[in-house]
Amino acid sequence: MTRPDLPTGFGGWQIVDATPQETSDGMYRCGPASVHAIKHGQICFPFDAAFVFAEVNSDVVFYTRSKDGSLEPVKVNRTHVGRMVLTKTPGDVTRRDISDQYKFPEGQKLNNVFLFFKPGRIFFSIARQ
C-alpha cells in the first residue's frame, strides 16, 4: 500500500484491526499502521502505531495494592504478549506465523520502546538505550 503521508520505506504492508474496541480520533478504527514502523518501534506515525506496537510488545505486570492504596509490582512477564502473530496460509487451512515481520526476536535489536498507560490510554513514551 502506498502511504504518501509517511516517510519513504514505511509503505507496503499495513496493519488494520477489524475489531477495534475503542475510538481513535473519535471513530472506532485501528490502522492502517505500517508494519515496518511497528517492527522498528517508530510509534509516532498515524494511524494507531503506538497502540499496535503495544499489541505485540507489551509486558504483563502483576500488582498488589498496599494498605495505603499504592500499587507495587510483584511480577513482570515480558514474553506473554506477542509470542505469535498468526495469519491464514493462502490456499490452505493452516496457520502461518508472521511474528518476525512485526517484531524482532525477544532480546534482540529492538524491543526498547516503553509505553506508559493510564487505563485505556497511552500517555507517555520514551526510547531506552
Image (spheres, rainbow, N blue to C red):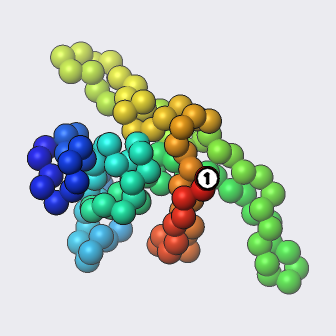
Place of residue 25 in the rendered image (x, y in percent of width and height, measured from the top left): 27, 75
User: Is 89 or 45 nearer to us in this picture?
Assistant: 45
Q: Residue at x 56, y 50 (%)?
A: 112
Residue at (40%, 25%) from the top-left corner? 97
Percent across and percent down for residue 52 are 39, 53
Q: Is residue 119 visible?
A: no
Label 1: which residue?
A: 129
Question: On the rendered image, what quadrant is the N terminus found in?
Answer: top left
Mark 1, other Cα within 10 Å: few <14 / some 14–19 / many ≥20: few
Residue 94 visible in rendering: yes
User: Camera-side residue: 39 or 9?
Assistant: 9
The residue most toward the bottom is: 68
Q: Estimate the x, y position of residue 43 in percent, counting from the top left.
A: 39, 58
Secondary element under disc 1, as helix, strand or loop, is: loop
* Amino acid type for the residue under numbered disc 1: Gln
Residue 27, relative to residue 21: is it above or below?
Answer: below
> Which residue: 77% across, 72% down?
71
Q: Residue furthest top?
A: 92
Q: Residue furthest right?
A: 67
Question: Residue 88 occupies which quadrant of the picture?
Answer: top left
What is the total number of numbered labels drawn onto the structure image? Answer: 1
Q: Is residue 67 above or below residue 77?
A: below
Left or right placement of residue 122 versus residue 6 in this view? right
Q: Position of residue 15 (x, y in %)?
A: 28, 47
Q: With 56 as the anchor, is 74 left or right in this view?
A: right
Q: Name which quarter of the figure residue 86 lies in.
A: top left
